[in-house]
């Protein structure tokens, strides 16, 4: 029998009796499993005044004297820190947190509930799910138990523990306000179906656990929807069932593989349902089957409406990439679709998602901080070249610099730099080495199937 760690407080509301949970026992039991994570990145310090400007300024302040520009004590580098949350999932030091908490960090420090501190090693990062797996050199540690996130219901009580604004081990309670949420713009690939809650999640809560009343983790707090950066009553958590799949792969191989269907799709609205004979709007409308894709090989056609994927109901079109992403390349999946007024059943063998390339970058690899563009690139997979029909290189890592300032993201595909088309990292390196020392340089990218040109501002 599942042990519940809660007592209840009875209150009277308008003559009716209601029971509110008391979370004290749950917090006391699970607080030792929560960790605070601090990170630092070493970046080149910028000189706010050029030598020529400084020399002219000193001449004006000290007429008749020769300026001495040999100033000592100016640091070549400075550190920038970040704070987040995480939690122990094993007694030998494995920790889950968010990818965005630790991505790009040179040093990661984990603070345990008992005030011990450990340097953490990155086992694996997964940007599409915003999850990271860390490891500290310790044993006999307390750890959480996972629950089944599929069983959570809208209206259920939940509790978050984390370090908002750097305040250690702070707890906040609320309810599940929605399920299956997709948050536009968070990634180039929509592989997440969030649990939405009204729990007060603030900066620093990222990576912390979301508990059900039984003291089980059913979510990992990831982000908030806010115009101010603070809690506005809408927060999003990664379902535990998704997290366990990601963590299993990160622990075994350091990377995550996701399947690829190969369709461009959109929502089935009332008009499309009326046109194609559905009794109500539902499913994913196939706008275009990508040539050479697994979908084409399976017989999926343009204007099909996918209603089920491997026995998962596709109610909204955003459900489909989430379901596909839970399976690995090579999986044979059943697809049920609506075509010309009739139901069709097909079997598709999934390909390899373009995100698999990003995940396969070796965790902990030495990063080239002297890169003047501020990002690194890698090869496109053959699957991406065939399915998307493009040539170029994929952005594998973004640091501070012209690329980040221009709005580039990890996963963007660069097809041209400085008006020159490229097909490999070697092409990119050759073109980049000949860029001017200052001014604006055009860069052509593909993102989400759409092409755009951005401007990189180079500084001497």
Image (cartoon, rainbow, N blue to C red):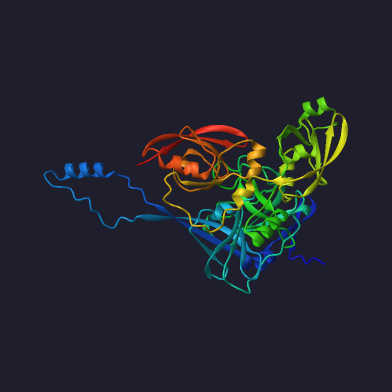
Query: Which quadrant does the C terminus fall into?
Result: top left
Residue lying farthest to the bottom in this orientation: 140
Q: Is residue 159 visible?
A: yes
Q: Is residue 403 left or right of residue 383?
A: left
Q: Is residue 236 left or right of residue 363?
A: right
Up/down of 285 relative to 85, above or below: above
Q: Position of residue 146 (x, y in %)?
A: 72, 61
Q: Is residue 178 visible?
A: no
Up/down of 356 relative to 302, above or below: below
As rendered, which of 274 and 30 lies closer to the eye? 274
As rendered, which of 416 and 160 lies closer to the eye? 416
Q: Residue at x 74, y 66 (%)?
A: 5
As rendered, which of 283 and 436 lies closer to the eye? 436
Would you identify the image quadrant in which residue 190 lies? top right
Would you identify the image quadrant in which residue 42 lies? bottom left
Q: Residue at x 24, y 44 (%)?
A: 54
As rendered, which of 398 and 274 lies closer to the eye? 398
Q: Position of residue 138 (x, y in %)?
A: 58, 72
Q: Position of residue 171 (x, y in %)?
A: 62, 59
Residue lying farthest to the right in this orientation: 342
Q: Is residue 161 left or right of residue 118?
A: right
Q: Position of residue 77 (x, y in %)?
A: 38, 55
Query: Which quadrant does the N terminus fall into?
Result: bottom right
Q: Residue at x 15, y 47 (%)?
A: 66
Would you identify the image quadrant in which residue 263 lies? top right
């Amino acid at each position: 029998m599942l042990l519940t760690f809660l007592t209840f407080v009875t209150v009277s509301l308008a003559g009716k009796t209601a029971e509110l949970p008391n979370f004290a026992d749950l917090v006391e039991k699970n607080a030792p499993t929560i960790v605070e994570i601090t990170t630092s990145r070493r970046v080149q310090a910028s000189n706010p005044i050029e030598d020529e400007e400084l020399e002219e300024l000193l001449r004006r302040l000290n007429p008749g004297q020769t300026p001495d520009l040999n100033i000592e004590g100016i640091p070549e580098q400075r550190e920038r820190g970040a704070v987040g949350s995480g939690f122990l999932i094993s007694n030998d030091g494995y920790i889950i947190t968010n990818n965005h908490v630790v991505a790009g960090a040179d040093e990661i420090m984990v603070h345990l509930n008992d005030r011990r501190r450990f340097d953490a090693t990155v086992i694996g990062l997964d940007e599409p799910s915003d999850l990271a797996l860390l490891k500290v050199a310790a044993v006999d540690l307390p750890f959480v138990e996972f629950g089944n996130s599929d069983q959570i219901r809208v209206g259920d009580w939940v509790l978050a523990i984390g370090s908002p604004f750097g305040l250690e081990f702070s707890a906040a309670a609320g309810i599940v306000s929605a399920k299956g949420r997709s948050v536009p713009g968070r990634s180039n690939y929509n592989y997440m179906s969030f649990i939405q809650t009204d729990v007060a999640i603030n900066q620093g809560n990222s990576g912390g656990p979301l508990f059900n009343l039984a003291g089980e983790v059913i979510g990992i707090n990831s982000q908030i929807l806010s115009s101010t950066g603070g809690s506005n009553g809408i927060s999003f958590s990664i379902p535990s069932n998704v997290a366990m799949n990601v963590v299993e792969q990160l622990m075994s191989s350091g990377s995550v593989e996701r399947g690829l269907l190969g369709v461009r799709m959109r929502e089935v609205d009332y008009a499309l349902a009326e046109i194609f004979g559905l009794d109500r709007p539902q499913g994913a409308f196939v706008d275009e089957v990508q040539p050479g894709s697994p979908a084409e090989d399976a017989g999926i056609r343009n204007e099909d409406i996918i209603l089920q994927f491997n026995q998962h109901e596709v109610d909204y079109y955003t459900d489909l990439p989430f379901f596909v992403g839970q399976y690995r390349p090579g999986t044979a999946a059943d697809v049920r679709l609506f075509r010309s007024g009739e139901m069709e059943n097909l079997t598709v063998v999934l390909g390899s998602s373009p995100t698999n390339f990003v995940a396969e970058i070796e965790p902990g690899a030495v990063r080239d901080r002297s890169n003047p563009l501020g990002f690194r690139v890698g090869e496109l997979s053959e699957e991406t070249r065939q399915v998307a029909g493009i040539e170029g290189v994929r952005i594998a890592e973004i640091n501070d610099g012209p690329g980040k300032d221009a709005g580039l993201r990890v996963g963007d595909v660069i097809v041209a730099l400085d008006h020159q088309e490229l097909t490999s990292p070697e092409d990119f390196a050759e073109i980049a080495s000949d860029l001017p020392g200052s001014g604006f340089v055009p860069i052509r990218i593909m993102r989400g199937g759409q092409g755009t040109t951005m401007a990189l501002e180079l500084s001497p």
